Image (cartoon, helix red, strand yellow):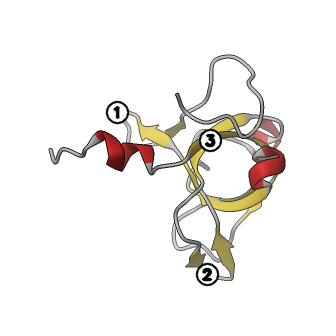
Amino acid sequence: MAQISWSDFEKVEIRVGTVLSAEDFPQARKPAYILKVDFGDEIGIRKSSAQITDLYRIEDLIGKQVIAVVNFPSKQIGPIKSECLVTGFYNSSGKVVLAVPDNEIENGSRLA
């Protein structure tokens, strides 16, 4: 495993946001949703393509807080620009489980 320095880690903006909307993304190569996530006044609302369709239904995502990297450059994914990377972990079946705070926290809060 490659090691990084503390200063490298400090460059990564990992923030909490609330999912405002989720919709199917039929143009994606792998099943995915398009999420709109509110990261508060400083960062605003960002779109993300998220391959989380195995364990999450659209209606369960609305209002859910997620943890995302917000300072990657935008990435064109089919017809949309993904503006943040919503984080998660692969479970033993290879399905993505979202990384989420276990208590509600203000949108835009940075990982401590």
Give the residue at mark 1: 92
Task: Note whether residue 67 is visible.
Answer: yes
* Kind of residue sitting beneath label 2: Gly
**What's the CA distance linking mark 3 and mark 2?**
25 Å
User: Upstream in the sequence, badge 3 or badge 1?
Assistant: 3
Q: Residues within 10 Å of mark 1 (few under 14, many from 20)?
A: few
**What's the CA distance linking mark 3 and mark 1?**
26 Å
Task: Note whether residue 37 is visible.
Answer: no
> For this rendering, which residue is in front, 75 or 4?
4
Q: As displayed, is residue 109 above or below residue 68? A: above
**What's the CA distance linking mark 1 and mark 2?**
29 Å
- Name the secondary structure under disc 1: loop
Q: Quadrant of residue 105?
A: top right
Q: x and y percent of residue 85 in the render?
A: 55, 55
Give the residue at mark 2: 78
Q: As displayed, is residue 89 above or below residue 29? A: above
User: Upstream in the sequence, badge 3 or badge 2?
Assistant: 3
